[in-house]
Amino acid sequence: MSPSDSLKADVCDDSDEAVVAAVWQLTRSTPWTVVGRVPLDFPVHHPQGVTRGHDHRLYVSTAEITEATRFHDGPVDGYDRTPGQGQGHVFVTDSEGAALGRVSLGEGTIYHPGGIDFDGGSLWVPTAEYRPNSHSIVYRVDPDSLEVREAFRFDDHIGGIVRDRNSGLLHAVTWASRQLLTFTVDGKLMHRVDNKSHFVDYQTCVTAGGGHMVCTGIAEYPLPGTGVFSLGGIAVIDIETGRIEHEAPVAVLSPAGRVVTYNAVHLETDGRVLRMFAVPDDGETAGESHLITLETPLAT
């Protein structure tokens, strides 16, 4: 049986406490094995989130940047940079990397999707300006028809969102995950707390349950001379306090040399392994970016 056949055969739990409990087992010495690496048959642009829906389909949120942001010499109207230009997308694919569909979203300077989630009925896609302290629109997308509906707007950058399937609440992170937010589905802000960790900027929320959320991301630290050191990480965060209750580094690199938790990550478990789907690399042409599948065994 090929890795892709194995993925189709497994029944995995990607919600509530199952993934949270699995992430608690991770340590610095946790071995991750790459069990699949397939090119994506569409231009991924700048991937941000990935989640799995019905029938083993995967949804990848991406930002197509047509004009890069530029830093100001000093704050201008409260912003440290220009908004740039672009278009947000959600692509549909599978474990073979096929191009199965696409929908575009955003408006004006709001074109940068973040980390996304599937709650069993809808995809939740935050889309923001590509700069901190800005503005966002949170969309609900039908996973079958790809119909887009605006859920609510928020006056800050939302970089990733996940829905707790037990409470029904949405949990999100701001730019560089400096703050953690909790919303109702119609956008009422219920809770806002500072992130107590400064080692890794969490790029995407993966799941939530039992008062915790799992986030993944990276931080880049300058090296003497030239270059940077990228630290990848996975964390269990207490939603109420913003405290990191457990975290572990990730050192596996993509074909382009990026840590696999650089951007889009989805986690699920079948009780035997913790499985990661990752799309870390940018790609402006079909086949340039890869869907990487990794697994690590769990204690039983």
Image: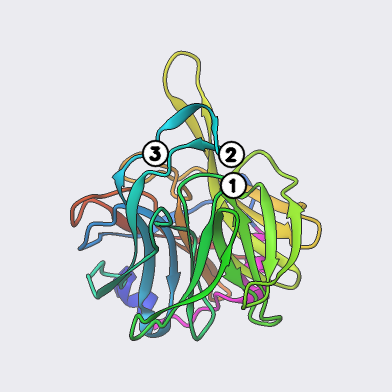
Q: Can you identify the residue that label 2 sits on? A: 78
Task: Check contact, mark 2 vs mark 1: CB within 8 A.
Answer: yes
Residue at 37% across / 79% down in the picture?
56
Q: Which mark is residue 101?
A: none
Asked whether, in this view, residue 83 is left or right of residue 300, the answer is left
Magenta residues, as a range? 9-25
Say which quadrant the N terminus sits in. Answer: bottom left
Binning the other alpha carbons within 10 Å of mark 3 as few (below 14), some (14 to 19) or many (20 upward) gives some
**Nearer to me, 112 or 281:** 112
Q: Is residue 225 visible?
A: yes
- Secondary structure type for disc 3: loop
Residue at 80% across / 62% down in the picture?
240
Check residue 67 for magenta coloring.
no
Task: Check contact, mark 1 vs mark 3: CB within 8 A.
Answer: no
Comparing labels 2 and 3, the label whose residue is closer to the camera:
2
**Based on the displayed image, in which of its 4 quarters is residue 132 positioned?**
top right
**Mark 2 or mark 3, which has the lower sequence index?**
3
Asked whether, in this view, residue 246 is left or right of residue 135, the answer is right
**Mark 1 or mark 3, which has the lower sequence index?**
3
Q: Amino acid at mark 2?
A: Gly
- Secondary structure type for disc 2: loop
Q: Can you identify the residue that label 3 sits on? A: 69
Binning the other alpha carbons within 10 Å of mark 2 as few (below 14), some (14 to 19) or many (20 upward) gives few
**Based on the displayed image, in which of its 4 quarters is residue 100 positioned?**
bottom left
Give how far across and how far down residue 238 sits, in percent.
Answer: 76, 60
Q: Amino acid at mark 3?
A: Thr
Q: Can you identify the residue that label 1 sits on? A: 133
Q: Is residue 79 above or below residue 265?
A: above
Q: Amino acid at mark 1?
A: Asn
CA distance for labels 1 and 3: 14 Å
CA distance for labels 2 and 1: 8 Å
